[in-house]
Image (cartoon, grey):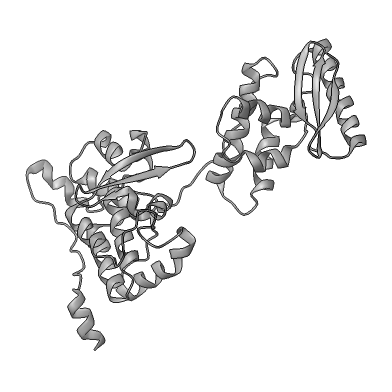
Amino acid sequence: MPLTIYKRGKIWHLRGTVAGRLIRETTETSDRKTAERIKAEVESRAWQRRLDGPGAGLTMAEVFHAYLDADKSDRFLLKLAQHWKDTPVAEVYPETIRRAAKLIYPEANEPTWNRQVIKPTQAAINYAAGLGWCPRISVKRYTEDPEIKTPATIAWVRAFHTQALVDGLPHLGALCMFMFGTAARVGESCRMTWGDVDLSLGTAKLYLFKPTPWNRVAHLQPELVAAMANLPTNRKTDELVFDYTGRGSLRGAWNNVCKRADIERLTPHCCRHGFATSMLQAGYDVKTVAERGGWKDAATVLRTYAHAIKDRSVTNVLFDTPAAQEAEKKIPSIRKIRRKKA
């Protein structure tokens, strides 16, 4: 059946066989003349591939379509498709991709360029290479110098929670404790509804949708259960537990609580770092820490989330001498803070 155009709703579509290849796709236009031009271009590319090989005339748009049709992750692909459009794959070189990263995300840094441009673009092209459409490509990553985050400690978390209660922000205080106690990300925590929580069993179900949808059940420690149980709420199953919609909605209040509590201004993600570091320093193996904290790869825990003890005297343990631990700042109680305010 020759390639024809037909209308579905207001949009023209293509259907038929060209050079032995079945084609069914949309022209994404409601203009018939434009649709006819697209039809001619599709026919030309199909014959070019038939005569010159499958990689002839291959475009980045076709590469991304094939990648998505194979149920690969669509994370970051929208901006990539908008940038590359119908650029021939033959004109895409490793350095072209590296430069594209800076053009697409001019305000970003090396980890973002690697994660959101270089890695997915290379993956899509190499998937097409696996189909025999084009040669494989290898792109040198940008050297990353990741910002070292300070892990939250239980003392810091309790100070934050105490100040949040004084400030009339119980949901924010409980959120901080929750992220530290479960290693939950901000997005996971803010999406959680009361229907996902069972305080009597001390469990909470967390959902992560990117890069691959999955869920896990986190354990809630008694102190955390108490903090959540004391939240002023009707606990409707569809009601958000912590009353915040995401990182942006809590940033200002979070920083203000840190300032009033006179503690270091850590980010919410430092609570996840604190979970991993505290568990490892308590003697638990990295596999257990990864399992309990929702990391699929234990190596990620060691590479990114584990932080060394700064006290040099820890090596005294080699001679059975107690280490001289750094004295932690004494955390005031709610009562003392209220007296001070009065």
Q: Residue furthest front?
A: 9
* Nearest the eye: 42 or 162: 42
Where in the figure is residue 278, as x and y percent of width and height?
24, 49
In which quadrant will I find the N terminus? Answer: top right
The answer to which quarter of the image holds residue 67 is top right
Q: With 3 as the anchor, is 301 left or right in this view?
A: left
* Nearest the eye: 207 or 173: 207
Instruction: Name the residue: 36% across, 45% down.
Output: 206
* Nearest the eye: 70 or 109: 70
Where in the figure is residue 65, as x and y percent of width and height?
67, 29
Q: Is residue 308 visible?
A: no
Instruction: Name the residue: 59% across, 43% down.
Output: 113
Q: With 228 as the anchor, is 214 left or right in this view?
A: right
Q: With 309 as the anchor, is 79 left or right in this view?
A: right
Mark count:
0
Q: Residue furthest right?
A: 33
Q: Is residue 6 visible?
A: yes
Where in the figure is residue 8, as x and y percent of width and height?
78, 34
* Nearest the eye: 95 or 32: 32
The answer to which quarter of the image holds residue 135 is top right
User: In the figure, 53 relative to 317: above or below?
Assistant: above
Where in the figure is residue 204, as x and y percent of width and height?
29, 47
In which quadrant will I find the C terminus? Answer: bottom left
